[in-house]
Each structure stands twice: as C-alpha cells, then as structure tokens.
Image (cartoon, rainbow, N blue to C red):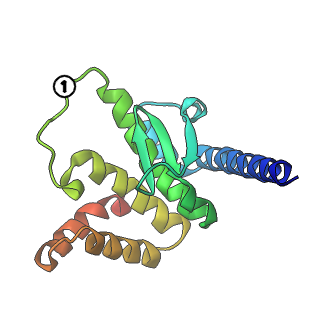
Amino acid sequence: MIEVFAAKKKKKKLMARTKIVADLKDFLKSNNIFKELCDEYEQDVSILDGIPVVFTSEIDVTAKTINAKVFLNTSLVDEKFEIMARYLIHELAHCFQHMENEGKKQDKNKKDYLNRPEELEAFQYQIKFDAKERSGEKANDYVNDLLSYHDIPKSKRDIKKRELMNKLDD
C-alpha cells in the first residue's frame, strides 16, 4: 500500500512539473523579452518547443544549461511563476549561445563568473525580464544580492551593477 501511494505521489509530482514547464514555455512565447532574445539570435519563438527543459534535484545550482538542454533545480517548484521564468530566460540565453557557438573553439581562459560575456548577457536578459514582470525595485534588489553572493568588492559594485542592468535602457 505504501509503495502504491509513493508511486501516485511521484506521478503527481511529475505531472505537476511537466505542466509547469509547459506553462513557462507558453508564457515565454508571448513575452517581449523572450522575443527580443530570439530576435538577437535570429530565432523564431517556436524554437522553444525543441529545447528540453526539466526539473532535477541533481544539480548544485538553481539552473544550468548543458548543450542547449535546460535543467532547473526542483527547489524552484516552490517559487513564484515569475521567479521560475526569470531563471528559464537566463538559461535560454545560454541555449542560444550554445547553438550559435557550436563547433567553434571555446575560450579556455575562464574569467570570473560575472565577467564572462555569456553570463553577462544571460543576466542582462534575466534582469530586464525581472524588472518588467515584477518591478524595477525587485530587479535592483536581486542585482544587489547577486553582487553580494559573488563577493564583488564594494569598490567595483556600481560598475558591475550598471553592466548587469544595461538592457533596462533598451
């Protein structure tokens, strides 16, 4: 009896997570920030249908993209829809980067995380999305938390903050 209950509970989790992914994709297809990202990479929004997005507990970060496949940490399931969507838009920027750079030699000299061009671009879209969907104040708070989390020295925070938030001017 316990095994049957556990199987039903797992099935409901799988169904719920699959529905969240479908809802996120549907939402982003009509979102102007996602459309802007698609335009930058000369992609139609329908490309999203072919990008795998799954929830997993097997990553040690909130979200990760490997070879244009998006992995969202199961901890996001309990977050607000807009929070899940902002992480997804960040990872979709990485998907487009992966597709565009496929077969090209990658820079082996890895810079600090927030100084990598691909991370800056992904965060810029994420922050622009956050400002539009939640508020400029919440996006600003997120950026401040991000800078603290990554131990950006106070002397460099204003410059890095402007860099991360520069798509807000578009």
Tell me: residue 75, above or below residue 153: above
> Residue 156's image quarter?
bottom left
Amino acid marked by disc 1: Lys
135 or 72, nearer to the observer? 72
Residue sitting at 11 percent across and 41 percent down? 109
Outermost residue toward the right in this view: 1
> Residue 123's image quarter?
bottom left
Residue sitting at 40 percent across and 62 percent down? 127
Residue 165 at what x, y percent from top left? 32, 64
Look at mark 1 in the image and give the residue it sits on: 105
Outermost residue toward the top in this view: 103
Residue sitting at 60 percent across and 43 percent down? 29
Residue sitting at 41 percent across and 55 percent down? 60
Judge the density around disc 1: few (<14), some (14-19), many (≥20) Cα neighbours within 10 Å: few
159 or 79, nearer to the observer? 79
Tell me: residue 11, above or below residue 131: above
Q: Secondary structure at mark 1?
A: loop
Q: Is residue 147 left or right of residue 141?
A: left
Residue 54 at what x, y percent from top left? 57, 43
Q: Is residue 126 left or right of residue 20?
A: left
Residue 78 at what x, y percent from top left? 62, 66
Tell me: residue 100, above or below residue 59: above
> Residue 79's image quarter?
bottom right
Residue 22 at what x, y percent from top left? 68, 44
Whether residue 75 is visible here, answered yes or no, is yes
